[in-house]
Amino acid sequence: MPEPKPPDAVNAPSRPARAGAEGAGSADPSSTSSSSLFGPTGFGPYEPGVKGRNGAVSAFDVCHVGVVLRALLFVHCTLAVAVSFGASDLASWLTLLAVAASMALPALLLWLVLACLLKQVLARLPAVAQWVVAVLLGAGSGAFGWGLQAAGGLGPGTTLLPPALAGALLAAAMFYWLTLRARARLPADTTARLAELQSRIRPHFLFNTLNTAITLARLDPARTEGLLEDLAELFRVALSDSGASVTLAEEVSLAQRYLAIEQVRFGERLQVSWELDEDAGTARVPPLLLQPLVENAVRHGVEPAPDGGVVRIRTRVKRAHAVVSIVNTLPQQPSRPGNGIALRNVRERLRLMHDVAAQFETHIDKDFFRVQIVIPL
């Protein structure tokens, strides 16, 4: 690792305001493929911490476009199979499916909207009560869909009871799937949390920073104080046990503190460029999302290069989403590959928080390594 640069090699940047976040580590840019895991759209805001009585994620947490799409697919596939028993040919099957879908679609959307709006209250109910509410909401939603169809003059050709029973049965099946999904997310959340704890702070970063502070203490006590303040804030956030989300602006502030420390170490070898959109700063992200990515950029893009390198961080708003890009130059001689914990950690935490509403991409473009994150506002 390079020796600390003399402290007068570069002016220490101004320290940003303190930010609240948690957990990080070093990342690995060895993967050169672009891996867009998630789609670009969102259904509603995710509120971390909606837990059931046993501490698991609530099964009524359906405010995600991924859940909505899967529910639509399940209900319509079920209808397609059910109406096939009464169809004599393809034309009649399509007609029956269209009639059934016109009743099921508004019923399903009503059930999802009610579950999303009431998830805070329903999550506190006992398990049996949650099942009862889910089934009753399904029956009421089925009756609602039947009523809309009757009011539209389509003529369901049946009484109210069959649609209500069908809605109750479909709601029970869907709530069972949501319950299994909530249980499955608990160990996934724990695994991501453990990886996060393991990859928070690299020891050699701490040692280098302390060595730099010792050198600065003899020449510039004021800058030493600022350096230690930045280091203390990083440790405070990294050792915090809060699981709440933070704003992108807070993440940017913490990343600025980290790069301020590294710039004192590397001096003119580290060139940092910021292009920030204030409107993008309101997006909610998992804690310590950016710090491991900028650490990755310094470790693999600047540290191995004799002449240093450039790190560019940009945030902007695009189509009701916040887009974050982190770009660093690549040295002629590749750095030692890392274990990729941080990149996997970032992907997993984005998936847990935003499901299909987030996008994470990494790729190499000539002499640059680029990470791009898209999150809903």
Image (tube, grey):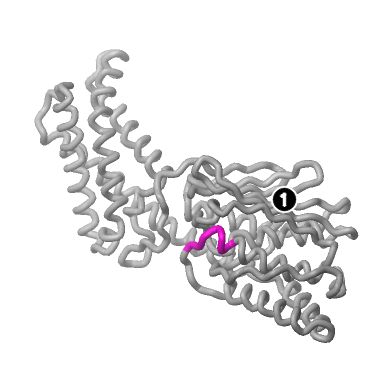
Which residue shows up at 58% across the image and 62% down it? 251
Badge 1 crowding class, 10 Å Cα cut-off, few under 14, some 14 to 19, many 20 or more, is: many
Q: Amino acid at mark 1?
A: Val
- Look at the image and say whether residue 247 sits in the magenta stretch: yes
Magenta segment: 245-251
- The quarter of the displayed image where residue 96 is located: top left
Looking at the image, residue 315 sits to the left or right of residue 54; the answer is right
Could you tell me residue 325's position as x and y percent?
65, 49
Q: Nearer the viewer, residue 143 or 173?
A: 143
Which residue shows up at 48% across the image and 61% down it? 189
- Look at the image and say whether residue 134 sits in the magenta stretch: no
Secondary structure, mark 1, is strand
Q: Classify 204 as above or below 245.
A: below
Q: Classify 151 as above or below 238.
A: above
Q: Is residue 84 visible?
A: no
Could you tell me residue 170's position as x and y percent?
25, 40
Q: Nearer the viewer, residue 374 or 145?
A: 374
Q: Classify 188 as above or below 140.
A: below
| Residue that mark 1 sits on | 327
Total marks shown come to 1
- The quarter of the displayed image where residue 15 is located: bottom right
Image quarter of the N terminus: bottom right
Q: Nearer the viewer, residue 15 or 28?
A: 15
Could you tell me residue 349's position as x and y percent?
53, 57
Could you tell me residue 317's position as x and y percent?
56, 46
**Residue furthest bottom as drawn:** 218
Looking at the image, residue 356 sits to the left or right of residue 10; the answer is left
Q: Classify 139 as above or below 281.
A: above
